[in-house]
Image (cartoon, coloured by chain):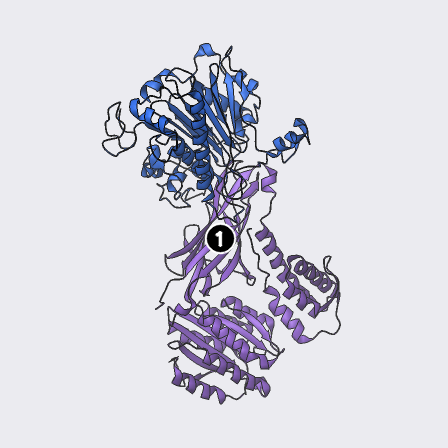
Chain colours: A blue, B purple
Amino acid sequence: MVCPKCAEPAGDDDLFCEGCGNDLRVRRGGTSAASVVSAAAAGAVSVAEAGVAPNDLLAAGAGEPCRRCGEPVPARAGGADDDYCPACGLRRPDGTDRVETDLGTVCGVSDRGRAHARNEDAMALGTRRPAGVAAVVCDGVSTVRSPELASRAAAEVALGALLADPGEPSDRGEPSDRGERSGSGVPVSTTSRAAAARGKRLVRRAVAEAAAAVESLGAPSDRDAPSCTLVCAYLDHPAGPGSMPVITIGWVGDSRAYWLATPGGAEPSRRLTTDHSWATSMIEAGKLDEAAALADRRAHAITRWLGQGGEPEPDVVSWRPDGPGLLLLCTDGLWNYLPGAEQLAAALPPPEEGAGPLRIARMLTALALDAGGRDNITVVAIPVPMTADVEETG
Amino acid sequence: MTGFQPSFTVEVDQNAYLHEGATEVDAVVTVTATGEPSGASTDALEVLVVDTSGSMQGERIRSARQATVAALAELRDGVAFAVISGSGTAVQLYPRGGGTAVADAPTRAEATAEVNGLSAGGGTAIGAWLAAVGALARAHPGGLRHAILLTDGKNGEQKRVFQAALDGVRGLFTCDCRGVGTDWRVEELRAIADALLGTVDIVADPTDLAADFRALMESSMGKNTADVALRLWTPLGASVRFVKQVAPTVADLTARRTESGPRRGDYPLGSWGAESRDYHVGVTVNAGAVGDEMLAGRVQLVRAGSADVLGQGLVKAVWTDDTSLSSRISRGVAHYTGQAELADAIQQGLAARKAGDERTATARLGRAVALAHESGNDNTSRLLEKVVDVLDAPSGTIRLRKDVDDADEMTLDTRSTRTARFRGGS
């Protein structure tokens, strides 16, 4: 293999790159690795961590003709206004209109859709050798300024926390937990209860760090400050490769996680999250039935969010599934069209086709686009148990 | 040279969302300059022009002398200055030999002595006075150049002669105009102030002149950036509907444009101290498809005639089929659209009243009362109440008054362009 950051050759078991010191146990990808806006925007997101040189992103698309006026567009200078064609003013694609990330065991698609000018969703996916998988999906609140900065910052920062080196002091795991990992590289004796507790700690910390990053994008009194939702998953293998992982889900707002059972699987399909939205709170309070609540124009107003003035307190669940299935994270650009877990499960290709997670994510995205694509669509798919090839390479 | 660089911020208030097929983009651009007033420049020229025509005799010339002396006292050391006595011709009162003097204690004392000897007699040729200031400004290029012009009467020059003189000095200096008494013409002084990027006001009572001149000079001494321009880039196929200053006063800048590059034009904004002004920019663009986003305008603040960009803001257009987004109107745009209409309603109403068209006057001034009430422009509401009887402010129901004081009517006319400031955001 080679280092994804500096292309220096490295051995398969190397922990760090000899050339640049990059942590080779971690692989990550997603929106920020494709986004020139994140590269140009100050601060909160480090694209370098995703293994991409900002200058490469700024040069991307230079010389290509503008879709509207046909003038060739120059390379970006990194300023606020070079997102636009210098002749006709049309916004230039910033790399995020369609993002596909394939890390083998975890894959995602994020699409601008058919009606929105920008893709304000963001996803960040990653793996950590020997057996940790993490994914974050965020949806920028479209009524505030620059919501894409919030979603990208939140996704990157949360993923960074989820993939943090368990041996680093920033992870306050139990000492025994840490000792076993650093000894053999494979967790052998941690119980799933301890793994669940660790997962919950990790997820809460990831959401807290993401919330702080998004809050830093606006002033405390700023009601127009960037803000977003977040749903994230962390999958841990306390009993080693091939077994069922302990899955921890955390969320703020109305981005969702679903469990979609493999046909005949012991763990039934279901929605794993409960929206922090006006409609849900009305239904839970018994004030409206589901149909009436969802028909209201306030139905999609979220009651928790990351960003100034929001309540970034996540709900967190953790468990080990009894049978195989697919873990799905998505924004409302998908679930508005397919809200039920059974509907989503029925839309999956039959198992004998052997579709991988990238194909599944593409398929579900295409369904939402065909249904109208009214919103940005982001879909992350993680087959459980995780596929073998990933456990070999990372 | 200027001892420091003020910093400019440019903020844009707009609703970028347009419904399908829409082409008109509106934005309010707030430009704010911040900097230490103590660092203000001495690379400056101040010219005081005092009307000494025959009508100024008596209390007016006495008040004009006092006011000019008060203004001289505010001159910062090192500033170049001159005093012009204006009648049928322009006579340089100080320094006697022409040119300018450099302000210090002795020159201020000499100038004061000359001013105290001023007497009134002769005609009024404002174009000639402006030309004299223009000659001094030409000899003093680059820095801040400012004049205060005081008159009490109607200009005696032919319109064509006056207009040629005004066009000849455009861009050479900024000029604040003051009319004393009620025999001068609001439209004449407003034309000068608009062309020379200054203010116009009435000083109905001559005894108030000294305080007014002192304030004007203080404000001028606080300016530290000469010749700033607003540079507007618009995309291919777009046209600029208008560029207006909307706060602190309404002034249409649309016709002031000079091309500065492809699809780019500069609008002169004069000199700046630590202050904030709002501009309303209207652009028409080619409609985009739903989901398209375009840059409809790039607003930059530049040092006139240079490539120095002091600040920048972006005006955008996003086409959507979500009416909950496209139907929102920016509060800033709505507010200043109303304030510009308010100024028009007052000026048209007063013109109709003068022409004896009471129906139009009642309708326009009634509309003005409603707009001033709605926008919380209390100063203008009070001035309107001196000219009309307000029966119901929200609906704009009024009756014209029969006996209106000339000074009240002229004050309303002169100050009709003053807007209530919009405070956007949270």
Give the chain of mark 1: B
Residue positioned 45% across, 61% down in the render? B33
Q: Quadrant of the N terminus of chain B?
A: bottom left
Residue A113 at x, y = what percent? 50, 30
Q: Residues within 10 Å of mark 1 (few under 14, many from 20)?
A: some
Residue B237 vs residue B348, the one in the foreground: B348
Q: Which residue is mark 1?
A: B11
Residue A117 at x, y = what percent? 50, 37
Q: Is residue A377 among what the camera can see?
A: no
Quadrant housing residue B173 = bottom left
Q: Is residue A332 among what the camera can see?
A: yes
Residue A84 vs residue A137, the one in the foreground: A137
In the shown orientation, is residue A76 left or right of residue A272?
left
Residue A326 at x, y = what percent? 47, 18
Three-letter amino acid code at the position of disc 1: Glu
Residue A136 at x, y = what percent? 45, 30
Picture layout, residue A41 above or below residue B130? above
In the shown orientation, is residue A152 left or right of residue A178?
right
Q: Secondary structure at mark 1?
A: strand
Residue positioned 46% across, 14% down in the render? A324
